[in-house]
């Protein structure tokens, strides 16, 4: 079990990553190649990633270099997922290059002693070898992560909207309590019962950075070194979908104008009354539409005291974003056909 011990100050310093952490996503995606767990949720990515790696020849780098450094095990080196990665891939890779040699040596030695890293792993402490590693990580991200960034951002957008609404409605502790089925909040301790090793991390006023992850599956992950800035990677909700990836009809035609408006209201989180006001209907009518949208897997609803808050599921977020892009294409087409002036 992993336990984070909060002080009152830590509750005020809790943060959620604004977007995907590219190096944590690299790590978690490499874990998806090492197990069938969660394969259904990443089936499309898994097929295309394997094909891309084979076609580009990157599989000859991933297999001998990356997989041994990112084992799906109780430990892999912390320096490979630096906190600086929240600012983007370039910042994260620069941090890997700048990691002190002694720290890399210590962590690689721990890898070999814990899960049996490769014999060549000690060379990662050398600047030249680390440069090769950074090059491989960039190439891997470009090949199999970047093409799916739209899906990744959609899932994380829905996750952040859910957290924001909970935070505003019920406070920080309610947000912690609703993070994931694999995480349990018992004031003042955040527990991950299924963690492979028993650990207690005392935050002592440092706060905690929560990083929702697209490729992480089932079990949250934390840094091994308790002296590093505390981080918890945890999986976002995955919903199987058969919606084609091609642009769909505009939402108004697909769902009807009222139901489409209710779906748009849920984009930032809305109560039934707020959704009714947005759509210009009565609360009873809005409630009928939220039921249908929820049954279709486009929104999720949570009760807080006397109110019910509706937010988008990843599927709902994807549908809404595609509708917005379709409307933009239609506006450009109308402008072109009219010689520059948009049609009414």
Image: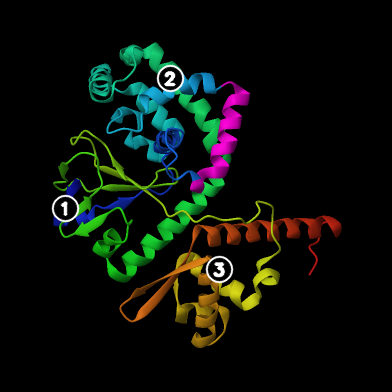
Could you tell me residue 156's position as x and y percent? Answer: 45, 52
Could you tell me residue 167's position as x and y percent? Answer: 32, 64
Calculate the distance from the C-alpha at mark 1 to the C-alpha at mark 3.
39 Å
Q: What residue is pinned by disc 3?
A: 296
Tell me if mark 1 has few (under 14), some (14-19) or many (20+) residues whose alpha carbon lies within 10 angstroms of its own: many
Sequence-wise, which precedes: disc 1 or disc 3? 1
Answer yes or no: is residue 126 visible. no
Q: Residue furthest front?
A: 36
Q: Residue at x 69, y 59 (%)?
A: 248
Q: Residue at x 30, y 13 (%)?
A: 122
Disc marking residue 133: none
Residue 46 on the magenta segment: yes
Most frequent secondary structure within the magenta stretch: helix
Q: What residue is pinned by disc 1?
A: 6
Q: Secondary structure at mark 3?
A: loop
Calculate the distance from the C-alpha at mark 2 to the C-alpha at mark 1.
38 Å
Above or below residue 142? Residue 39 is below
Above or below residue 28? Residue 174 is below
Sequence-wise, which precedes: disc 3 or disc 2? 2
Q: What residue is pinned by disc 2?
A: 65
Q: Pick whichever, 53 or 137, lies toward us.
A: 53
Sequence-wise, which precedes: disc 2 or disc 1? 1
Position of 25 compared to 234: left or right? right
**What residue span does the magenta drawing correspond to?**
40-57
């Amino acid at each position: 079990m992993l336990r984070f011990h909060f002080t009152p100050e830590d509750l005020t310093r809790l943060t959620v990553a604004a977007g995907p952490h590219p190096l944590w996503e690299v790590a978690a995606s490499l874990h998806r190649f090492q197990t069938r767990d969660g394969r259904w949720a990443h089936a499309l990515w898994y097929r295309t990633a394997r094909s891309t790696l084979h076609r580009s020849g990157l599989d000859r780098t991933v297999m001998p270099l990356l997989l041994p450094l990112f084992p799906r095990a109780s430990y892999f080196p912390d320096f490979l997922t630096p906190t600086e990665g929240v600012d983007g891939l370039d910042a994260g890779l620069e941090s890997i290059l700048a990691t002190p040699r002694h720290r890399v040596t210590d962590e690689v030695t721990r890898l070999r002693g814990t899960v049996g890293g490769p014999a060549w792993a000690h060379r990662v402490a050398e600047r030249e070898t680390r440069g090769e590693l950074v090059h491989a990580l960039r190439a891997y991200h470009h090949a199999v992560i970047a093409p799916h960034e739209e899906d990744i951002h959609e899932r994380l957008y829905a996750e952040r909207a859910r957290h924001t609404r909970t935070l505003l409605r019920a406070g920080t502790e309610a947000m912690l309590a609703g993070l994931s089925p694999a995480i349990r909040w018992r004031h003042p301790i955040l527990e991950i019962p299924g963690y492979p090793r028993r650990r207690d991390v005392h935050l002592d006023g440092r706060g905690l950075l929560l990083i929702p992850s697209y490729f992480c599956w089932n079990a949250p992950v934390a840094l091994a070194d308790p002296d590093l800035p505390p981080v918890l990677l945890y999986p976002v909700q995955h919903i199987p979908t058969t919606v084609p990836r091609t642009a769909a009809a505009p939402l108004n035609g697909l769902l009807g104008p009222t139901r489409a408006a209710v779906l748009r209201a849920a984009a930032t989180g809305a109560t039934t009354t707020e959704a009714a006001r947005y759509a210009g209907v009565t609360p009873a009518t809005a409630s009928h539409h939220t039921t249908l949208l929820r049954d279709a897997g486009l929104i999720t609803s949570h009760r807080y005291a006397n109110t019910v808050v509706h937010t988008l599921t990843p599927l709902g977020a994807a549908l809404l974003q595609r509708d917005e892009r379709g409307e933009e294409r239609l506006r450009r087409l109308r402008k072109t056909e009219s010689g520059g002036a948009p049609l009414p």
